[in-house]
Amino acid sequence: MTDKNVTLSDSAAKRIAKILDADPAKSAMRVSVEGGGCSGFSYKFDLVEQAQDDDLVLEKGDARVLIDQLSLVYMDGSEIDFVDNLLGQSFQIKNPNAVASCGCGTSFSI
C-alpha cells in the first residue's frame, strides 16, 4: 500500500489493546491529522469499526491502529507512544517532521 513508516511503542500497543477490549464493537483506533490546534495541525484519536481501503494498518499484539493516506504524509517516521507519568496519561506522537509543537503535545507544525 505505502512505503511510509509509522511505529507503535509497546506501551501504546498495550493501552490500545485494553481500550479496544473494553469496546467490542470497535476493531481499531484511528489516528489522523487535522488542521487546527495551537501549532497548526493536531492529532485526533477515534475508535472505529473497520478500516478504509487505503488505510495503513499497524498491528502489534491485540492492538490495531489505522492511519489514512493524507495523515500519513504528515506522520511519516513517527512513533505512537503512550505515556503514564505524574502529569497524567496520554498518547503522544513522536514526529520527526514536526518543527514545533505546543505544550499540550497534541498539536504541531511542519
Image (cartoon, helix red, strand yellow):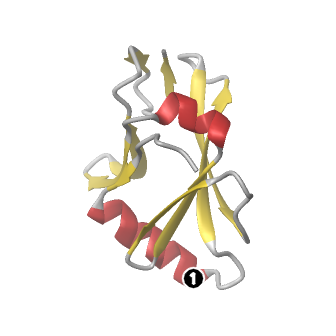
Left/right placement of residue 35 relative to residue 16 reads right
* Residue under the image location 52 percent in, 73 percent down: 19
Where residue 52 sits: x, y (%)?
Answer: 74, 58
Tell me the residue that label 1 is attached to.
22
Residue at image location 73% in from the left, 58% down from the top: 53
Total of numbered circles in the picture?
1
- Please indicate, yes or no, whether residue 106 appears anywhere in the rendered image: no
The x and y percentages for residue 103 are: 40, 26
What amino acid type is highlighted by mark number 1? Ala
Q: Is residue 31 above or below residue 108?
A: below
Q: Nearer the viewer, residue 109 or 50?
A: 50
Residue positioned 25% across, 50% down in the render: 86
- 109 w.r.t. 3: above or below: above
The picture places residue 77, in percent across and down from the top left corner, at 37, 36
Against 91, residue 39 (above or below) is: above
> Would residue 18 be visible to someone looking at this image?
yes
The reply, left or right, for residue 29 in relation to residue 94 is right
Q: Residues within 10 Å of mark 1 (few under 14, many from 20)?
A: few
Location of residue 49 by image quarter: bottom right
Please give left or right for residue 65 compared with residue 5 in the image: right
Q: Pick the residue in front: 102 or 95.
A: 95
Q: Residue at x 66, y 34 (%)?
A: 70
Which SS class for mark 1?
A: helix
**Nearest the camera: 30 or 59?**
59
